[in-house]
Image (tube, rainbow, N blue to C red):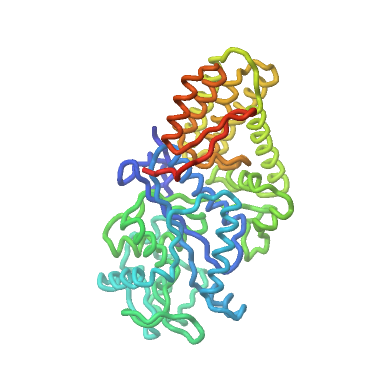
Amino acid sequence: MTIRLHDTLSGETRPLEPLQSGFVRIYSCGPTVYGPVHVGNFRSFLFADILVRYLRYRGLRVTWVMNVTDVDDKIIRGAAAAGIGIRELAERWTRRFLEDAEALGMTQPDVLPRATDHIPQIIELIGELTRRGHAYRTDEGSIFFRIASWPSYGKLARLDPENLRVGERVEADEYGKDDVRDFALWKGPKPGEPSWSTAIGEGRPGWHIECSAMSMAHLGPSFDIHTGGVDLIFPHHEDEIAQSEAATGQQFVRTWLHCAHLQMAGRKMSKSAGNIALVDELLEQGISPGALRYALISVHYRMALAFSEDSLAAAASAVERLDTLLAALRGYREDVQDDPSVDEALATGRRSFEDALDDDLNVSAALGAIFELVRDLNRRIDARTLSTADAGRGAAFLLDLDRVLGVMSEPAEDLDSDLVELLAERAAARASRDWVASDRLREALAARGISVEDTRDGQRWRRTTEPTRA
Ligand SMILES: [Zn+2]
């Protein structure tokens, strides 16, 4: 098995080789919580979700960290406008983000670190950069990263360091930095702004340093994958690389993955462009969560995604076809011989699905493989050539692949694939009236914390204990 991913830094599509065999450490730049997170941002988060789900489906252990930026200029302005503290504003919008994420079936990250909970790590990192001569303090008490001290600056974005940040709105005077290219690690105190009293002085962290401090605090100085939207390549991720590697002397990230924009009516969706769509509003309009999720994940992450009523309608119809087939397979009873060509079709479908996702997470090709199989199974159902057991295997197959996609209305509940296999085997044993095998499989499932009950519509399972994770 080789999962290949397109690394922005090298520009190459390369095999994923985790630093620690079988264990992948991933950091995703998360939301800045000063307002609702629009579906354009969710596209980038759900792309990371698909990555995490697929690596787990492939049997890899994953630790997924997604930060929450809970102190920055927008939050400070928003809190002042609302007449509340930044903590309260950030809590409000963090809650809302998590509700929307859950509605969209996003895997809960293993760690959701908040910037304001990592001030000591940020201070330590800035201290190290200062000691190593990469940072300097201004008269106003701000601390800047000195880009001239880091010759490889610009390598991620492929920019010439000499011409950086021209045209960018630079508040050079405000913080009195030496070079307009330099970026703030620490912002000196200002009236009306929150600040921390620390060993490096009074003030608050800059945005870029947060992600370096939090990712390294939870994943170590070097980790496998860093994700974000393409708009974060410069300056955010460029700055992250510079300040992390300058502080540790080690490679910061092995693979950089960047998700393309979501466009609505031909323009990038953004708060400033004023063309945003929100998760809760779309759901209130009657779009199903599965359809919205499908619309956001179904295009390859490096391609621009055109989001529209048409794309939502197409997504809804695709999800409905999957749900309808699953229900049909589950309710299906036909006393005919098992057909080996069904197993072959399922195996071929699975191989195509995995080949597509192995190829830099080509979700659209993976969906193509699934729908080819959907057509095949529907034909067999119509012709009544499918056996009851084959139908059970088809249903288990769909649910198993949906562990990666997460779009079907009956979620696979993150059941391990060997359990799905055992359930399918038991359904097959019952269909062929092999009660000895059926009882043996019931016991095997019970030992794994799954209790099975037989109903007129086939077997139903539930958990008796929390699943244990290796
Ligand atoms: Zn970040």
Q: Nearer the viewer, residue 373 or 357?
A: 373
Q: Position of residue 438 (x, y in %)?
A: 49, 23
Q: Total label count?
A: 0
Compared with residue 227, is residue 203 higher up or lower down, i.e. above or below? below
Query: In which quarter of the view is residue 77 placed?
Result: bottom right
Q: Residue at x 63, y 15 (%)?
A: 335
Q: Nearer the viewer, residue 97 or 245?
A: 97
Compared with residue 131, is residue 150 higher up or lower down, i.e. above or below? above
Give the left or right position of residue 151, taking residue 329 as reference. Answer: left
Give the left or right position of residue 175, taking residue 150 as reference. Answer: right
Q: Position of residue 137 (x, y in %)?
A: 34, 79
Query: In which quarter of the view is residue 206 placed?
Result: bottom left
Q: Position of residue 414 (x, y in %)?
A: 50, 41
Compared with residue 147, is residue 109 higher up or lower down, i.e. above or below? above
Locate the N terminus by quadrant. Answer: top left
Res 158 seen here: no
Q: Residue at x 44, y 30 (%)?
A: 443
Q: Nearer the viewer, residue 44 or 414?
A: 414
Compared with residue 313, is residue 375 higher up or lower down, i.e. above or below? above
Q: Position of residue 27 (x, y in %)?
A: 42, 55
Residue furthest top as drawn: 337
Res 33 seen here: yes
Q: Nearer the viewer, residue 465 or 36?
A: 465
Q: Residue at x 34, y 68 (%)?
A: 121
Locate the C terminus by quadrant. Answer: top left
Q: Residue at x 63, y 22 (%)?
A: 376
Find ligand 1 in the image and state its quadrant: bottom left
Give the left or right position of residue 126, taking residue 392 as reference. Answer: left
